[in-house]
Amino acid sequence: MSSNNFQSTNITSPGSNDILCGRGGGTNAHPGNIKFRKLVAAHKLRYLAASKSDKPGVARDVVREWRAMDPPGRFLAKMDKKAREK
């Protein structure tokens, strides 16, 4: 599925490549969050060795790699009922 055809709003069932933003066990245990933490850990040494000016580039590389997955990795935030009704 191409990223152009992949839903980015009103998501009711997050996929295994989705990151659920938030705190607590519900988000920590989500498969996408677990995979993302592993990806971040894989880049940790490179980040720590990077200069202050190069650190944002390492972070961008992590996000780029996550979004290049199939299906694309997404960063999802739960919306309250009022926000969904807009």
Image: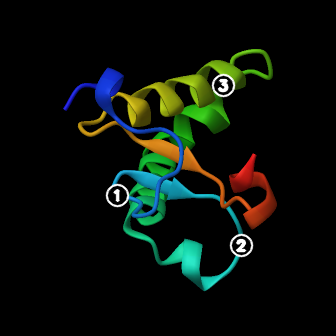
Residue 72: x, y in percent?
34, 36
Front label number (2 vs 1):
1
The residue wearing badge 3 is: 50
Instruction: Assess whether mark 1 and mark 2 are in contact (beta carbons under 8 angstroms).
Output: no
Q: Amino acid at mark 1?
A: Gly
Q: Secondary structure at mark 3?
A: loop
The residue wearing badge 1 is: 15
Q: Is residue 16 left or right of residue 20?
A: left
Q: Residues within 10 Å of mark 2 (few under 14, many from 20)?
A: few
- In the image, residue 41 sits, relative to residue 29, either above or below, namely above
Q: Residue at x 43, y 65 (%)?
A: 34
When asked about the image quadrant of residue 15, the answer is bottom left
Total count of labels: 3
Residue 30: x, y in percent?
45, 71
- In the image, residue 68 sits, relative to residue 36, either above or below, namely above
Structural distance between the alpha carbons of marks 2 and 1:
18 Å
Q: Residue furthest front?
A: 85
**Label annotation for residue 23:** 2
Q: Secondary structure at mark 1?
A: loop
Q: Residue at x 75, y 45 (%)?
A: 86
Return the residue nearer the eye: 86 or 14.
86
Q: Amino acid at mark 2?
A: Arg
Structural distance between the alpha carbons of marks 3 and 2:
28 Å
Whichever of callouts 2 and 1 sits on the residue coming sooner in the sequence is 1
Instruction: Assess whether mark 2 and mark 3 are in contact (beta carbons under 8 angstroms).
Output: no
Instruction: Give the image's coloring scheme.
Output: rainbow
Q: Residue furthest left?
A: 1
Front label number (3 vs 1):
1
Q: Amino acid at mark 3?
A: Ala
Structural distance between the alpha carbons of marks 3 and 1:
32 Å
